Amino acid sequence: MLNNFYKEDWISTAIIENMEDLIIIIDNTEIIVYANNSFLKTCDYNKKEIIGKNILFLHPDKENYIKLREKIFNGEPWKGELGLKKKNGKFIKTELTIQPLKNIEGEVEGFVGNYKDISKIEKVKKNKKIEEKRIKTIFKKAPVGIALIDPLTGHVYEVNPRFEEIVGQSLEKMGKIDWINIFHSNDVLADLDSKEMVDTGEITGFNMKKRYIQINGSSVWIKMIVTPIAHVKRNNKIKSLLCVIDEITDLKKKELILENSNKELEEFAYIASHDMQEPLRVISIYCQLLKEKYYNSIDDEGKKYLDYSIDATFRMKTLIKELLDFSGVGRKDRSFEDIDLNNLVKVVLEDFSKAIQETGVNIIVEKDMPTISGIRFRIKQLLCNLISNSIKFRSKINPEIKIGCCEKSLKDYWLFYVKDNGIGIEPEYYDRIFGIFKRLYSKEEYPGSGIGLALCKRIVEIHGGEIWVDSTPNDVTYFYFTISKNKYFC
């Protein structure tokens, strides 16, 4: 009867023969009467090698098999893990489901065994455990502080030892308070604004330098990077904030000393330049008086000397003005504001309308420029200097300048470029051109003070960015610069 059962109702169907699961049928004497293609292929048997044999040769572990045998011969199904022997003697870890086959009278005539190969799953689980252990070890022994924060409550729920050491508080104490409460009061607003931008998806994370208040009341400077961790199964909703910190108190002290030293130098440069204007003004006035009253009374050699003196005082006046401007960047500038670059670029190009008309330069501006946070006057100055530079070193044939933004390339910064097809710059001068008073050409070839690009570098730096050049001589030159999207970058 069993033969008729499986031949007419099971094997005759293509479903069981082509299932991925390993299917086997045995009679009530435990003799194998059928095995599907997946079973034969996985275990590397052919039908002659397996049909008619006792099931025990596939399960040498008799102790476990005897336990399940008692259950299935009572007409009950069984499910559990059992090793399956392949032809080469190796074992596959499987999850086996056995269903008794009964006749009309309810007597057991055989069994259907459904094997699921879980060896790969077990391997994945094993590898996952190894990886989890590795990550936990890294987390525990990392030289930087790491914390996981609940984005809804703001509570810290997991930290590594280094985080506790830097902050000076245990997880138990941190977990009971909002993490905002351990920030220095002057740094809270910046952090709240940045966190809000992460929550709304405006930015994908942020980094900043700030202070933590330790349990003893002292503050410690840290560099912090916060990255949201999304829950894939919940529409990428933020489930945690990953916070990585590193203590920079000693570095900050050194920076403060250097900053104070630089301020003193800037103040000296500012005062010196300012004080030089008065004697220079007197020299300029008397040179002009000499020219007005005695120019026709002196010989050609004397006229040449006088003209040289007047020209030199004019250039000195321009140089002092630009030096004052350079030393003033970041010192007495107004606060940051939102700047629509579409409008600002239009204003800048209007200022250059005469130069554009005279030189025949074609200037192309990307249509959708972003709104950034910055010092309007300085950003305008930055654009003016870069455009002026491109016009000055323009190509003699079809000069062209392109201005644009590559926002998608960086997540925390706006990336801009000013491109021209002018004379270009050799790679060995890429760094030199951003130094103060560093010129590649004489003032007779290309007039200028040598401060323009140094000023650009200074302006970009106070906006949390960098500036660099990429050029192919006599072909194309790109001036790239970045502006931080985080108004609290410093």
Image (cartoon, helix red, strand yellow):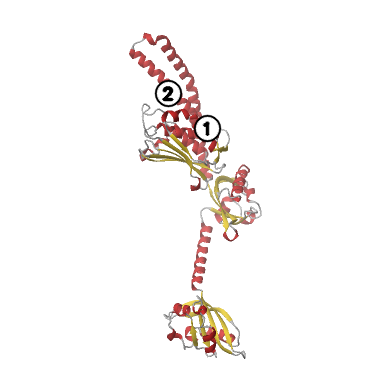
Circle 2 Cα neighbour tier, 10 Å, few/some/many (<14 / 14–19 / ≥20): some
Q: Quadrant of residue 102?
A: bottom right
Q: Position of residue 98 (x, y in %)?
A: 56, 82
Quadrant occupied by the N terminus = bottom right
List the residue tagged with mark 1: 347
Which mark is on residue 156? none
Circle 1 Cα neighbour tier, 10 Å, few/some/many (<14 / 14–19 / ≥20): few
Please state if 277 lies on the left or on the right of 393 as rendered. right
Residue at horizontal 44 percent and vertical 12 percent from the top: 289
The answer to whether residue 179 of the structure is visible from this angle is yes
Query: Given this view, does label 2 or label 1 mark the residue nearer the observer?
Result: 1
State the SS at label 1: helix
Count up the numbered dots: 2
> What is the three-letter code of the residue carrying label 1?
Val
Q: Position of residue 267 (x, y in %)?
A: 51, 29
Look at the numbered discs 2 and 1 and tell me whether their residues touch, using CB distance below 8 Å. Answer: no
Q: Quadrant of residue 311?
A: top left
Q: CA distance from mark 2 to mark 1?
A: 27 Å
State the SS at label 2: helix
Residue at horizontal 50 percent and vertical 24 percent from the top: 274
The answer to whether residue 82 of the structure is visible from this angle is no
List the residue tagged with mark 2: 315
Q: Position of residue 63 (x, y in %)?
A: 53, 84
Q: Is residue 171 above or below residue 451?
A: below
Q: Is residue 392 above or below residue 27?
A: above
Quadrant occupied by the C terminus = top right
> What is the three-letter code of the residue carrying label 2?
Arg
First-in-chain label (2 vs 1): 2
